[in-house]
Amino acid sequence: MDVSIRKISAGGADKLQRVLGTFDENLNLIASEVGVNLRVDGDSVVITGAEDKVSRAYDVLENLFILADGGESLDKGRVSYCIELAKEGKAADITKLSSGVVAITSRGKPVKCKTVGQKRYVDGIKQNPVTFGIGPAGTGKTYLAVCLAVQAYKQKQVDKIILTRPAVEAGEKLGFLPGDLQTKVDPYLRPLYDALQEMLGLETYTKLMERGSIEIAPLAYMRGRTLSNAFIILDEAQNTTREQMKMFLTRLGDGSKMVITGDVTQIDLPDGKKSGLEHAESVLANVEGISIIRLTDKDVVRNPLVMRIVRAYEADGKRRNKLEEQTDQ
């Protein structure tokens, strides 16, 4: 096998150190995932290995240096994602994410899209009255939707933020929880509370809740209403029935925007009940004004281990489906 050697300059020791990571963890990750040898030479990195792998590692480092130059954080998740893109010949796509702030948290931290899929999702929400974000855990579906809802409220594009989830148990029973209905469903809505408080700060969040500018309620509370001038988010939509999904979508009023998020691999409905999210995805695919964005394991922005967990479960699901098909035959 012919060995290829290439050298890429960081253009400065500070930039190089940001790309290398703590104790060179980013550099080691690139070397192991791409299959090359990497060594530091001054403010440059020397890449040795098979020609195609050297070229891939070069693309990864080149784009990471561009991100570092723009002040972007380069944790292991970001580096892993750049490697994934490089394997598809799309490493340069990651630099498109460095521009454009989705929102600013209450502590002044900018929220940006971390993957190409997230950017498509955010663009879909901005451009359409109704957007579906379908994908595995950790892809930022709910968080980004809440960020955009808060931005729309602050910019007076809407008068109200409405967040809702179907109160379907994931193995637990609501009846055994203490308190009234609101107290019982609060644990199901906790991720929405947390995202809102991060975006608004506890004091502002509390005031808006008391004023009724933010409403958080079970899906059943939506029946019979027309939701106008509001930003409405339906979370965990895989646990809606077809009837519930139709009911929810037809609540859309003038000046409103809806975002529906869910993961079709985590359906907790009783056996025999078809998910309203799966049904809506097939029925509404070509309806104007509705954007359906599919996020994948590549869009997972939590610990990189989450991406590997998602992939392992997906592979297991495929094996099980194949065995069931063989059994049926």
Image (tube, rainbow, N blue to C red):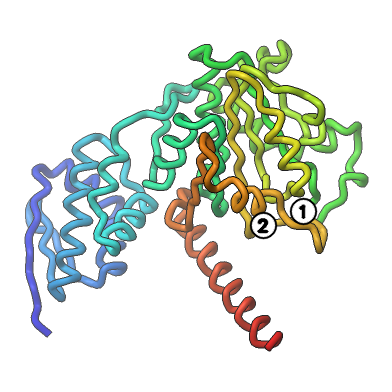
Residue drawn at x 69%, y 22% is 227
Q: Is residue 294 left or right of residue 251?
A: left
- Contact (CB < 8 A) between labels 1 and 2? yes
Q: Secondary structure at mark 2?
A: loop
Indicate which label's residue lies in the foreground, 1 or 2.
Answer: 2
Q: Position of residue 12 (x, y in %)?
A: 10, 42
Image position of 197 with respect to 238: above or below: above
Q: Is residue 288 visible?
A: yes
Q: Secondary structure at mark 1?
A: loop
In the image, 165 versus 190, the foreground residue is 165
Q: Name the kind of residue labelled 2 in the image.
A: Gln
Task: Indicate the quadrant where residue 59 lies.
Answer: bottom left
Image position of 71 with respect to 115: above or below: above
Q: Is residue 243 left or right of residue 290?
A: right
Marks 1 and 2 sit apart, C-alpha to C-alpha, by 9 Å
In the image, 120 versus 176, the foreground residue is 120
Q: Is residue 163 left or right of residue 109?
A: right
Q: Which residue is mark 1?
A: 170
Residue drawn at x 84%, y 31% is 182
Q: Which residue is mark 2?
A: 266
Q: Position of residue 158 (x, y in %)?
A: 57, 16
